[in-house]
Amino acid sequence: MRLDVSAMENSFTGQVNDCAGLFGAGADMPGMELPTCTDFDGFQKETKELMKNKKGTTTLAFIFDKGVIVAADSRASMGGYISSQTVRKIIEINPYMLGTMAGGAADCQFWHRNLGIKCRLHELANKRRISVAGASKMLANILYSYRGMGLSIGTMIAGWDEKGPGLYYVDSEGARLVGTRFSVGSGSLYAYGILDEGYRFEMSVEEAGELARRAIYHATFRDGASGGCVSVYHVGPNGWKKLSGDDVGELHYQFYPAQVTPVEQEMADAPAA
Amino acid sequence: MSRRGDWVYENNGGTCVAIAGADYCVVAADTRLSVGYSILTRDHSKICELADKCVLASSGFQGDIKVLHKNLAARELLYQHQHNKRMSCPAMAQLLSNTLYYKRFFPYYAFNVLGGLDSEGKGCVFTYDAVGSYERTGYSAQGTGSSLIMPVLDNQLKSPSPLLLPARDAVTPLSELEAVDLVKDVFASATERDIYTGDKLEIVVINKAGTKREYIELRKD
């Protein structure tokens, strides 16, 4: 039986852009064009300044006795400008697996969609769902082959397969880590503070969702690149379900209601001249 | 501007805006083309009608934009021949995203806004960054005047986020005439404070009756 390594092939790197593919039936995917210059890294550095791509974020995920909780904010920044407050950073790869977006928005969107396609092809070829370990490995191998080219992806693959809940951290440097608690992004340090303090393995789904919501809220409070809405998902044996979506502006007053300060001295009307 | 000998990009300036309504979509862009402090022409369209219900407006480097529009129009024509129907706006949105991402390492210097009607006839606007990350929104502005225009659109048009749960109803959107007036107002304001925006405003309105185009004069200084 031949070992199937098709997941490790990718038709993207440095092929000549073959226009004949456009006119063929079921057009072939064009290869990714590279700039014709001697200094690839310098070129990428300059274009990064120019393009000001969307990034900045806080995401987190953790395993507990009833499954996996995944949460993220929804802000995207382009340099110092907030380009969107409604970005979907929790990507639904399939009905029982979620991926989170941190780093370059286009990189995450594209490669998660690509991963979803490969997972579906695996299902069709093998007549069973792919495991979380398998899906994360496929993504990690693809990202490793682009190592050093400037992709910026820090993602967590969370899902429920035959072995139970699964959580992997995969990034564009080529890392793939299995774990029970992760937070990724510019606001991750703040989220870790709340998450590590409140985490217990035995929790109800509501408690776990509330912990995740509070952790992301605190990250949006302190990190300028995080904000918008907190989305919290739960992945259980029957797949994922969205638990909550709250605007952090309103959440602030839920956690810290406005205090009515007693008035010391009221302004009096000026006497009529 | 880069000091590299092989630098191929330049910013030709300009601003694009799109607003989606219940059954219409307005896509607008100014017509000034600049290089540095010079105006090369006052009459250059940044808008491309890709399908009967799908219009793309792009600002940035016009060399890349010309070829991007040309490629997308060609792909739409192929789709028409293969599927015997025109491409829907959401389908074109994903095609544009993929087209931009395939040049991830040598990007199109184009900031795009795609507007049109979805398959239910509701207005839709898709906003992009230079390498293909995209999102469906109710309104968007891209280009040199975008940071002047977006706050005004946020103030007038912002509705509860689609990420909220339980979902909240979006505020009643503007009528078509009110949206076109808003677009004229924001461009007049952007022209006052952005040197790359001005001359003429091209407005394209898409609704179920079809597409209509209007030109408004802007300040030429």
Image (cartoon, rainbow, N blue to C red):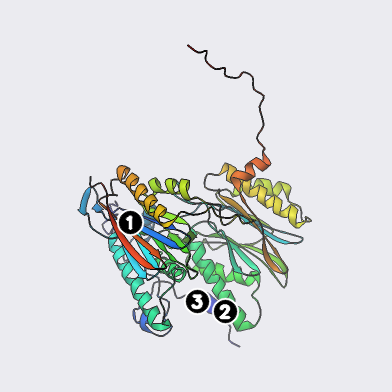
Across and down, in percent, residue B135 comes to 48, 60
| Residue A148 in sight | no
Looking at the picture, do discs 1 and 3 lie on one chain?
no
Left or right of residue B221: residue A181: right
Q: Secondary structure at mark 1?
A: strand
Q: Which residue type carries mark 2?
A: Leu
The residue carrying pointer 3 sits among few (fewer than 14), some (14 to 19) or many (20 or more) residues within 10 Å by Cα, namely few
> Distance of mark 1 from mark 3, alpha carbons?
42 Å
Which image quarter is the C terminus of chain B in?
top left
Left or right of residue B120: residue B2: left
Across and down, in percent, residue A157 comes to 61, 64
Left or right of residue A32: residue B41: left
> Distance of mark 1 from mark 2, alpha carbons?
42 Å
Q: Nearer the viewer, mark 3 or mark 2?
A: 2
Chain letter for the residue marked with disc 2 in the picture? A
Q: Which residue type carries mark 1?
A: Ala
Q: Give the numbered dot on residue A121.
A: 2
Chain letter for the residue marked with disc 1 in the picture? B
Q: Give the numbered dot on residue B29.
A: 1
The residue carrying pointer 1 sits among few (fewer than 14), some (14 to 19) or many (20 or more) residues within 10 Å by Cα, namely many
Residue indicated by mark 3: A9
Q: Which residue type carries mark 3?
A: Glu
In terms of depth relative to the viewer, which is nearer, B57 or B84? B84
Q: Give the numbered dot on residue A264.
A: none
Across and down, in percent, residue A152 comes to 49, 59
Left or right of residue A38: residue B24: right
Q: Residue at x 51, y 56 (%)?
A: A103
